């Protein structure tokens, strides 16, 4: 196991900030300066204010209205320290005032006037290929796309038609280098079958299967855009909410993306908690990043997964080859709808969990003096 020297990382690396699901709707939206109509259509909860009340009952009062930067808490300073070249999140929220909700049990919506909470974290790209971006219908998706583009935040994985949904976000990295962010989701993550974009209808990039043929189709799309010096990231919303198991077909598909499709890093999400990490042919595969921001405080169930403990991934890739040079992971706790540094005890728990789950994948994490996790792996 080796860790790349920091001097090597600084000299030729491109650093990406990656995290899992960012849910700024529902309870979180209620503490921001412009809360949406709180009415919900869930079986057991009829108002988003109830999620706020549960969080306050668990951990104490939450400021209202909170500053747009409040929800990011300690993560803002941590990400600034890492100085990433690009910041990518999976946004699991529709930004809209639309009332045309989907009858699916849970619907996330953030008021358009609260979009500065994303700008506060200097987000470059919001991945939208997930099971909540159309919670408030295609009108809600249209609003989300429009608002993010006006804010100069790029999107990937959803669009006004299939061609636009497949088009990657393109982030200039300096010189002639670019980061290409492709995104898609699968039905096993909860994406509704009719949410798939078509040649004439808006929606998300929905992969009907994870077959070799699907990988080849992705390879064609990547080859049509990627040029020498580019780094290609594939962000994928897949799998269920709970459980550490990595399905064999997920593992095979991630590797095919690297082997055949020209992908340099795989950014997986959907599980509410982090999963194991693999470095395959020196390329990064995050099978499940876990949630990063949500309104689940005070909700009972699945306590063993400790999903209130979340991770921010700062991956430095070789700017010429796309190979991973270094992966540093900052642990946080969601408390009072805000990210705060994890305690040393909680960081150790996360380290032990990652090492347990990643042992079959050949990676290992250690805590450094700053209470951050640093990944090591075989570089043969």
Image: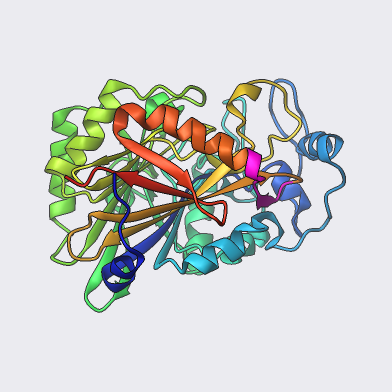
Q: Count of labels shown?
A: 0
Give the left or right position of residue 231, taking residue 227 as reference: right
Residue at position x 60%, y 33% from top? 307
- 232 versus 336 height, above or below: below
Furthest-bottom residue in view?
Answer: 175
Residue 5 at x, y = what percent? Answer: 32, 62
- 141 versus 356 height, above or below: below
Give the left or right position of residue 45, taking residue 173 as reference: right
The image quarter containing residue 108 is top right
Residue 267 at x, y = what percent? Answer: 36, 44
The image quarter containing residue 64 is bottom right
Q: Is residue 76 magenta?
A: no
- 4 versus 172 height, above or below: above
Residue at position x 13%, y 38% from top? 216
Residue at position x 76%, y 48% from top? 30
Q: How is the image coloured?
A: rainbow
In this rendering, does residue 99 appear at all? no
Q: Quadrant of the N terminus?
A: top left
Q: Which residues are magenta?
A: 337-345
- 314 versus 345 height, above or below: below
Residue 350 at x, y = what percent? Answer: 54, 37
Q: Nearer the viewer, residue 171 or 378?
A: 378
Give the left or right position of residue 20, taking residue 176 as reference: right
In this rendering, does residue 353 appear at all? yes
Residue 16 at x, y = what percent? Answer: 39, 59
Give the left or right position of residue 241, taking residue 215 as reference: right
Q: Quadrant of the C terminus?
A: top left
Q: Nearer the viewer, residue 55 or 23?
A: 55
Residue at position x 21%, y 63% from top? 230
């Amino acid at each position: 196991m080796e860790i790349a020297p920091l001097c090597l990382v600084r000299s030729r690396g491109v650093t990406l900030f990656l995290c899992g699901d960012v849910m700024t709707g529902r309870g979180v939206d209620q503490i921001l300066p412009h809360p949406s109509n709180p009415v919900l259509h869930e079986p057991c909860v009829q108002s988003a204010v109830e999620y706020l009340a549960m969080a306050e009952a668990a951990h104490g009062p939450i400021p209202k209205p909170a500053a747009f930067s409040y929800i990011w808490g300690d993560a803002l300073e941590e990400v600034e320290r890492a100085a990433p070249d690009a910041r990518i999140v999976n946004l699991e929220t529709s930004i809209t005032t639309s009332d045309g909700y989907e009858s699916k049990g849970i619907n996330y919506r953030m008021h358009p006037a609260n979009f500065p909470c994303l700008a506060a974290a200097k987000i470059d790209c919001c991945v939208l290929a997930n099971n909540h971006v159309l919670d408030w219908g295609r009108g809600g998706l249209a609003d989300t796309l429009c608002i993010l583009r006006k804010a100069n935040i790029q999107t990937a994985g959803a669009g006004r038609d299939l061609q636009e949904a497949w088009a990657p976000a393109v982030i200039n990295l300096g010189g002639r280098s670019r980061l290409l962010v492709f995104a898609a989701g699968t039905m096993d993550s909860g994406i509704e079958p009719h949410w798939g974009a078509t040649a004439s209808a808006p929606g998300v990039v929905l992969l009907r299967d994870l077959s070799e043929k699907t990988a080849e189709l992705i390879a064609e799309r990547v080859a049509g855009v990627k040029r020498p010096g580019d780094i290609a990231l594939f962000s994928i919303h897949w799998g269920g909410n709970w459980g550490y198991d990595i399905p064999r077909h997920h593992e095979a598909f991630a590797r095919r993306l690297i082997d055949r499709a020209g992908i340099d890093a795989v950014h997986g999400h959907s599980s509410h908690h982090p999963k194991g990490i693999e470095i395959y042919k020196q390329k990064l595969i995050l099978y499940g990043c876990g949630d990063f921001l949500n309104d689940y405080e005070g909700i009972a169930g699945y306590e063993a997964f400790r999903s209130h403990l979340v991770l921010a991934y700062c991956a430095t890739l070789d700017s010429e080859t796309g190979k991973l040079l270094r992966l540093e992971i900052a642990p946080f706790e969601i408390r009072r709808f805000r990210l705060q540094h994890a305690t040393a005890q909680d960081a150790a728990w996360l380290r032990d969990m990652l090492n347990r789950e990643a042992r079959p994948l050949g990676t290992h994490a250690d805590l450094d003096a700053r209470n951050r996790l640093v990944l090591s792996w075989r570089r043969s």
